[in-house]
Image: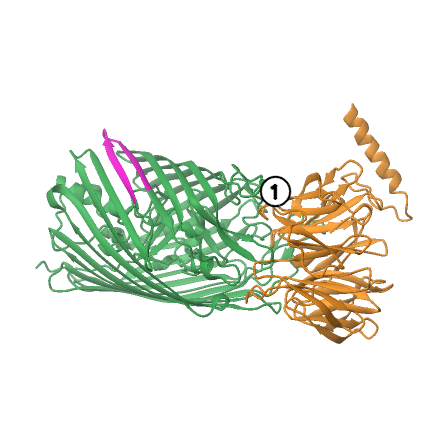
Chain colours: A orange, B green
């Protein structure tokens, strides 16, 4: 009886919430109805050629997890290797790397409104103007320009053989290119590379701190065992101001910040934390991974909670693990296979 | 009588296999059971199966149980195709990415690289990736193919033995020709020719083949989006061509026997996208040149064999999409020597082998070299014509490092008239491949060999009565493998580690029953396998894979083949059942079980012992939409037809010398 009531309740809620917009979105057969502030999207990469990419949703209210939002809403699998999610103009741009596409979905019910194709191996999306976004690419040799009005590719900027994360500040776009010891600077007006900043190879993530400085994180070059570095860059002069090198045995990834943009977090097997005023890398792990296999990291801007994913053996469903701002374990939930990106909605 | 029987037993024992006859040509050399007792090993010595050197490699094996590939009738309409197709048609479970795509097999829950593939005694597994691809091995090249699932020398997971053997012909020289051709949908053409020449001291076979497929079939994406609109497979063409020669000669003393086998192959395949990839530009080229020269000497007291092999391998993988190509060049030089003697009814074999391998791979330049030296021995004895025992030991040096001592002990007991019981226990290991050790980045030079403990047992029932023959075998096994090598993605790249401890156990049932009378022949061949293989070692907290069946390993597979023939006309109906396979280690996703039905109808004409066969076949009769590997499209119902012609030159009456 209780079950029936709940199910009926859910159906009603989803019916009501689906009336919110002019074009009523088809109800998600999970009964999902997601509003901003409800929880966290988790991008589960899935296995290469395994076709098991999924977007999971963790709900703050009851800590429940919906493992797969896309399939029930669209009656087809998301695709092969889920890479990233970017919210633009109220829509989620879900990049599916090895399917060479972006699914534009309504985050409310995860119904796909458009599938953008034409990429080689897309990675990340960055909005650079109200009508324009950039899409980085693993093998595309540069950045694809996305027209956000038509949701189609409108151009291409040759940059480097692998473009990764991008960040915009001072009207300029900074682009990581892991195969090169450079951060490229692109002018979004002319859609051209205007400068490059000497760093080290293996750049994977960047953040902008409260002082307007750009922090660049690199794992180095695995092929030559060259170590990575955390580098602070002056975004006006395009010069590195501080270089904090790692060792060969480190593998730092997933640089992120708290809401105040005064603390940096990254993964180096453990979760590491440092202040933007520190002049040395932290030595003591902030959250040790223990027998887990940390893979993704983000900090909830609303309350400072730290979310980490555990990819276990990369061949089974992983975990979303939540810690308090001071590192106390709060929750551990099963999500999809190889959970990577964590996005607060 | 006793001596003859023992001889035969030792052949079976050391071969470690129940040999089967692929091309039908070797059949005339096979010694029927009834004649064994009378067959004293004299000057006209011909082995019933391979020559001694071919068996020598396997000498440290014990009869496991096999997929007994049926007689030449069954073979005759698979000769032009690949071994992958032949095995598949005989109920051997294959992990195949599609026609012309990578096809490997493994037994009893072992991995593909734990299964030896031996060609005339030489291991064909790539030294770099450890895999032997059955899709680029044409069936016409082999006179004998046998599968051993039990414990085999230096192989955790069993072995496939492929032998080619040229036949001497007494009296006037004999010339034979075989032409086999198959045509199928989706641009499939398989053609092979075999020319055989035999005289008293010299025999020669020359074989050539060309296989091609476009594989542009339409398929229905399973939940692939857009409803169920069919799609056409792209970038999936394939060809394989090659030439082989087998020379065999003997000196004046007929017990000195030389053989030279050479095989050149050139294959190209496009690698199609999965259903969830937009497109693929990937392709792979494989070229190899394989040569084995062997010498056998036989006398009543001692048998000596020496073989030397030179194998070269070239592989180019082009991933497309501006990605870096991977090129492999490897060369391997092997020498094997062995001696067998039998003091006081004990059969003793001592053998030594040396293998030198060098590989140049884009991902781990400069070149890497490996040198192995091994020595092994076996002792067997028959007690009162009832019980046979065998004891085997083997060890080797990898460079200067001594590897674990392996060995096994086995027994075979003839119980009453119909039953045979077998039992064996042993230890086997597998060395890591070059890629495991050296791939950059990720290669792990600290890997230990995979190390297994095996226990096998079985019972076989055989009954022959008038026109009726009944054979049934049931086998059980248990294996525990330590240091199982598994590649895992690290923070930036994949790394192989000795991660798992895998426990496997299961059973194999094999049934063959045949009824023959006048022009009629009916037979049924059926197999049912159960395997449970699980990782028992957790390395990460929250690992939900412990105790669960390994990925892509069906717990149940079964196969049934019904064959009816009358006066040369035949009809075959075959069902292959593959159980559910998990695609995540925590069993959160899986591929459903499927059944494939194939029917074949044909006519076989025998003229002076040589046959001509023409057939038409429907594969996947019920048009099942299935996946052998996740998101890899497989063809629906499709048709093919084939023709095999054999003829030989007229032989003059034999002069008895």
Residue at 80%, 56% in the rendered image: A261
Instruction: Estimate how packed mark 1 is, as few (under 14), some (14 to 19) or many (20 or more) residues with alpha carbons within 10 Å.
Output: some
Q: Chain of mark 1?
A: B
The N terminus of chain B - image quarter:
top left
Magenta part mainly helix, strand or loop?
A: strand
**Residue B456 rendering spot, x and y as whole percentages:** 34, 37
Specify the quadrant of the image occupied by residue B270. bottom right
Along the viewing direction, whichever of B269 and B90 lies nearer the viewer: B269
The image quadrant that residue B182 belongs to is bottom left
Residues shaded magenta: B407-426
Kindly indicate the quadrant of the structure image that contains residue A290.
Answer: top right
Check if residue B367 falls in the magenta segment: no
Q: Residue at x 45, y 43 (%)?
A: B109
Apparent side of residue B418 relative to residue A61 in the rendered image (left or right): left
Compared with B381, B48 (above or below) is below
Disc tally is 1
**Image position, residue B364 (x, y; %):** 48, 66
Q: For the residue labelled by badge 1, is the local secondary structure a helix, a strand or a loop?
A: loop
Relative placement, left or right, of B459 versus B183 is left
Q: Nearer the viewer, residue A195 or A70?
A: A195
Is there any visible trace of residue B32 in the rendered image? no
Q: Is residue B260 among what the camera can see?
A: yes
Residue drawn at the location 23% of the way across and 54% of the way down:
B351
Give the vertical position of B256 relative to A69 (above or below): below
Residue B606 vertical placement versus B521 (above, below) = below
Return the x and y of residue B556 as percentages of the image width and height. Answer: 48, 38
Residue under label 1? B589
Report if residue B409 lies within the magenta region: yes
> Residue B625 versus residue B55: which sits nearer the camera?
B55
């Amino acid at each position: 009886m209780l079950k029936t009531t709940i199910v009926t309740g859910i159906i009603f809620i989803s019916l009501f919430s689906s009336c919110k917009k002019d074009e009523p979105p088809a109800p998600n057969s999970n009964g999902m109805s997601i509003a901003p502030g409800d929880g966290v999207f988790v991008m589960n990469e899935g296995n290469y050629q395994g076709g098991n990419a999924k977007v999971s949703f963790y709900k703050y209210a009851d800590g429940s997890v919906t493992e797969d939002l896309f399939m029930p809403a669209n009656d087809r699998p998301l695709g092969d290797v889920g890479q990233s999610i970017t919210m633009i103009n109220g829509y989620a741009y879900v990049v599916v790397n090895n399917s060479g596409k972006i699914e534009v979905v309504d985050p409310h019910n995860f119904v796909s409104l458009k599938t953008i194709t034409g990429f080689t191996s897309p990675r990340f999306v960055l909005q650079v103007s109200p009508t324009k976004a950039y899409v980085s690419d693993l093998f595309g040799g540069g950045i694809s320009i996305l027209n956000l009005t038509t949701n189609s590719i409108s151009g291409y900027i040759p940059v480097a053989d692998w473009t990764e994360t991008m960040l915009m500040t001072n009207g300029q776009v900074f682009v990581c290119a892991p195969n090169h010891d450079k951060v490229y600077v692109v002018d979004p007006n002319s859609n051209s590379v205007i400068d490059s900043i000497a760093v080290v190879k293996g750049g994977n993530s960047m953040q902008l701190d409260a002082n307007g400085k750009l922090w660049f994180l690199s794992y180095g070059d695995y092929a030559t065992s060259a170590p990575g570095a955390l580098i602070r860059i002056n975004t006006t002069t395009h010069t590195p101001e501080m270089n904090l090198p790692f060792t060969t045995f480190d593998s730092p990834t997933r640089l992120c910040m708290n809401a105040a943009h005064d603390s940096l977090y990254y993964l180096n097997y453990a979760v590491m934390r440092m202040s933007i005023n520190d002049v040395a890398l932290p030595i003591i792990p902030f959250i040790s991974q223990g027998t887990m296999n940390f893979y993704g990291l983000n900090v909830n801007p609303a309350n400072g909670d730290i979310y980490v994913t555990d990819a276990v053996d990369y061949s089974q469903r992983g975990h979303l693990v939540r810690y308090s701002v001071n590192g106390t374990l709060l929750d551990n939930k099963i999500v999809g296979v190889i959970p990577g990106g964590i996005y607060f909605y | 009588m006793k001596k003859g029987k023992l001889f035969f037993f030792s052949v079976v024992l050391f071969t470690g296999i129940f040999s089967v006859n692929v091309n039908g040509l070797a059949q005339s050399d096979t010694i029927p059971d009834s004649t064994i007792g009378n067959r004293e090993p004299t000057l006209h010595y011909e082995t019933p199966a391979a020559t001694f050197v071919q068996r020598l490699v396997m000498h440290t094996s014990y009869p496991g149980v096999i997929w007994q590939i049926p007689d030449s009738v069954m073979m005759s309409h698979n000769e032009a195709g690949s071994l992958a197709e032949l095995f598949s048609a005989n109920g051997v479970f294959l992990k195949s990415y599609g026609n012309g795509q990578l096809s490997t097999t493994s037994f009893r829950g072992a991995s593909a690289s734990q299964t030896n593939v031996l060609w005339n005694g030489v291991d064909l597994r790539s030294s770099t990736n450890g895999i032997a691809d059955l899709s680029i091995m044409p069936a016409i090249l082999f006179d004998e193919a046998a599968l051993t699932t039990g414990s085999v020398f230096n192989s955790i997971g069993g072995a496939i033995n492929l032998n080619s053997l040229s036949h001497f012909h007494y009296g006037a020289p004999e010339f034979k020709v075989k032409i086999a051709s198959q045509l199928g949908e989706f641009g499939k053409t398989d053609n092979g020719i075999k020319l055989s020449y035999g005289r008293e001291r010299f025999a020669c076979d020359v074989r050539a083949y060309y296989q091609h497929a476009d594989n542009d079939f339409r398929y229905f994406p399973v939940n692939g989006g857009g409803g169920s609109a069919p799609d056409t497979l792209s970038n999936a063409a394939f060809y394989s061509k090659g030439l082989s020669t087998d020379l065999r000669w003997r000196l004046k003393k007929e017990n000195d026997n030389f053989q030279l086998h050479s095989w050149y192959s050139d294959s190209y395949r496009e690698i199609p996208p999965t259903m969830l990839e937009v497109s693929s530009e990937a392709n792979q080229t494989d070229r190899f040149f394989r040569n084995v020269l062997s010498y056998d000497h036989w006398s009543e007291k001692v048998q000596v064999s020496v073989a030397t092999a030179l194998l070269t391998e070239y592989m180019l993988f082009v991933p497309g999409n501006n990605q870096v190509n991977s090129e492999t060049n490897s060369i391997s030089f092997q020498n094997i020597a062995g001696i067998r003697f039998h003091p006081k009814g004990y059969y003793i074999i001592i053998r030594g082998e040396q293998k030198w391998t060098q590989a140049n791979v884009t991902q781990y330049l400069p070149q890497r070299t490996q040198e192995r030296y091994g020595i092994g021995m076996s002792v067997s004895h028959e007690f009162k014509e009832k019980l046979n025992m065998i004891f085997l030991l083997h060890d080797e040096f990898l460079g200067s490092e001594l590897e674990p001592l392996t060995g096994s002990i086995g027994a075979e007991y003839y119980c009453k008239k119909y039953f045979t019981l077998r039992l064996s226990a042993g230890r086997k290991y597998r060395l890591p491949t070059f890629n495991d050790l050296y791939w950059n980045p990720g290669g792990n030079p600290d890997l230990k060999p995979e190390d297994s403990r095996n226990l096998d047992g079985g019972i076989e029932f055989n009954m022959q009565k008038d026109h009726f023959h009944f054979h049934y075998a049931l086998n059980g096994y248990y294996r525990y493998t330590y240091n199982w090598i598994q590649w895992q993605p690290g923070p930036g790249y994949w790394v192989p580690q000795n991660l798992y401890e895998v426990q496997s156990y299961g059973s194999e049932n094999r049934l063959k029953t045949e009824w023959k009378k006048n022009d009629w022949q009916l037979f049924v061949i059926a197999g049912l396998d159960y395997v449970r293989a699980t990782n028992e070692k957790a390395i990460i907290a929250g690992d939900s894979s412990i105790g669960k069946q390994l990925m892509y390993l069906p717990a149940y597979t079964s196969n049934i083949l019904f064959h009816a023939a009358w006066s040369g006309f035949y009809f075959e109906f075959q069902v292959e059942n593959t159980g559910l396979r998990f695609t995540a280690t925590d069993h959160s996703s899986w591929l459903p079980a499927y059944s494939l039905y194939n029917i074949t109808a044909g006519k076989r004409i025998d003229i002076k012992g040589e046959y001509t066969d023409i057939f038409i076949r429907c594969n996947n009769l019920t048009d099942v939409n299935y996946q052998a590997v996740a998101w890899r499209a497989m063809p629906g119902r499709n048709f093919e037809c084939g023709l095999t012609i054999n003829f030989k030159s007229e032989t003059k009456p034999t002069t008895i010398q």
